[in-house]
């Protein structure tokens, strides 16, 4: 996996996330000239053989303008109503602008469950893959008309990262109102330094994230770093760039300031990509230093190395694995229900049958169901790089 930045046209499949403030003006509505220029950039990439997907914010922002809703935070039902109106307008706008370049747009609305539940994840991926095969540009957004506070992404940065990993993209571009990552929020700290290349998302990099920058935005640098962790773990590079220029992709190609995040050394397989990208792990296992060393060498997690079990999860649920420092280092599928996991935590595998009354699995989390997610990046224990060809379950 290359750690060197390359031109956009050299990537095979690119996901572009567009923030609300770029597409919609709070008073006048859709910024059509900007959208037309953006679509011209997309047409240029497609002409060079690049497959393009768009994760477009703006449905709620556009809908609230059409409905003339007041400024400030909206109630959930107001947001859903605005989304219902805005999604129609937004889809039409994308379709019309892309058609200028003889490109067909396909609308895909996703909820958190569509990417967190394995069967729905595979169904969504199949639909998007078919659109790409047919030469269309999928325009993807969170389905805000049905998503509730408890079951939503709440930002399109992380949704875009999940989409990128879902379809095996090799580049994710986050366009917003900031031109990259700084050592501190530049509007608060005049001494903040710009970071052009981020080789690895370390705890220090995570500490640099700030909050949301505008009323129309539900994200911020925090969600962009979260997106970067999801994408780079799966072997997908990421760029954070300003979308303010009328041709933002062309500006990136011309050398406009942007931050590039290098992908992990070994992309994970499709199944492990799904595990690593889960936003809502059902519980956590805290392990000792010896178990952490074993995991990093490609071994399974045995009960003996588990020091604490938290949460209420069932066998097969995704759980986070914390190192002795308390930081997440891996994610995996639980081999036991939470109650059983608590009973055998710290015990030798040979003791499981006597404790539980049946001969269970030797591993708390098997290596085939586990992926490293900490600063050291993901490791591919076995199997081929599924991003090079057809993606399988």
Image (cartoon, rainbow, N blue to C red):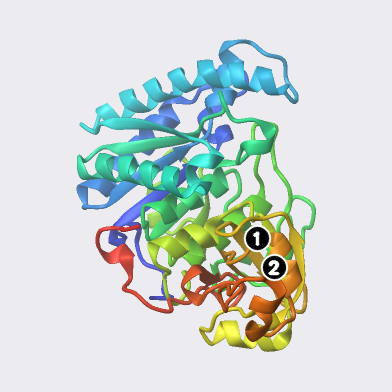
Pointer 2 residue: 341
Q: CA distance from mark 1 to mark 2?
A: 6 Å
- The one nearer the camera, 197 or 277, is 277
Residue 236 vs 355, above or below: the answer is above
For the residues bearing labels 1 and 2, Cβ distance under 8 angstroms: yes
Residue found at the far top of this picture: 67
Q: Residues within 10 Å of mark 1 (few under 14, many from 20)?
A: some
Residue 287 vs 233, above or below: the answer is below
Rendered residue at 64%/11% (across/down): 68
Which image quarter holds the C terminus? Answer: bottom left
Which image quarter holds the N terminus? Answer: bottom left
Q: Which mark is residue 169?
A: none
Pointer 1 residue: 337
What is the total number of numbered labels drawn onto the structure image? 2
Q: Is residue 245 left or right of residue 301?
A: left
Q: Residue 137: x and y, percent?
A: 31, 38
Residue 304 sits in quarter: bottom right
- The one nearer the camera, 343 or 321, is 343
């Amino acid at each position: 996996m290359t750690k060197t930045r390359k031109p956009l046209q050299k990537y095979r499949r690119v996901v572009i996330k567009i923030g609300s403030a770029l597409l919609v003006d709070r008073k006048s509505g859709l910024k059509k000239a900007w959208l037309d220029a953006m679509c011209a950039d997309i047409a240029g990439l497609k002409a060079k053989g690049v497959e393009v997907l768009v994760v477009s914010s703006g449905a709620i922002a556009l809908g609230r303008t059409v409905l003339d809703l007041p400024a400030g935070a909206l109630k959930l039902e107001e947001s859903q109503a605005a989304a219902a109106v805005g999604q129609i307008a937004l889809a039409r706008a994308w379709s019309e602008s892309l058609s200028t370049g003889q490109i067909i747009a396909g609308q895909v609305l996703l909820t958190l469950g569509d990417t967190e539940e394995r069967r729905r994840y595979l169904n969504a991926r199949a639909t998007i893959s078919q659109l790409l095969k047919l030469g269309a540009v999928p325009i993807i957004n969170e389905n805000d008309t049905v998503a509730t506070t408890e079951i939503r992404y709440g930002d399109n940065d992380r949704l875009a990262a999940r989409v990128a990993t879902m379809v095996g993209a090799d580049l994710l571009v986050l366009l917003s109102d900031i031109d990259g990552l700084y050592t501190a929020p530049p509007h608060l700290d005049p001494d903040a330094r710009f970071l052009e290349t981020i080789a690895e998302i370390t705890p220090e990099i995570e500490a640099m994230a700030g909050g949301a920058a505008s009323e129309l935005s539900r994200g911020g640098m925090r969600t962009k770093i979260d997106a970067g962790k999801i994408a780079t773990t799966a072997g997908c590079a990421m760029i954070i760039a300003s979308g303010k220029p009328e041709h933002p992709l062309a500006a990136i190609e011309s050398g406009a300031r942007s931050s590039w995040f290098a992908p992990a050394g070994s992309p994970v397989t499709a199944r492990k990509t799904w595990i690593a990208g889960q936003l809502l792990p059902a519980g956590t296992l805290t392990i000792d230093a010896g178990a952490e060393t074993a995991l990093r060498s490609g071994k399974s997690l045995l009960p003996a190395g588990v020091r604490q079990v938290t949460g209420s999860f069932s066998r097969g649920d995704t759980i986070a694995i914390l190192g002795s420092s308390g930081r997440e280092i891996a994610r995996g599928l639980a081999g036991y229900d939470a109650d059983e996991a608590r009973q055998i935590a710290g015990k030798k595998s040979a003791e499981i049958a006597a404790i539980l009354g049946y001969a269970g699995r030797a591993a708390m989390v098997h290596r085939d169901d586990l992926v490293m997610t900490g600063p050291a990046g993901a490791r591919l224990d076995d199997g081929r790089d599924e991003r090079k060809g057809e993606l399988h379950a």
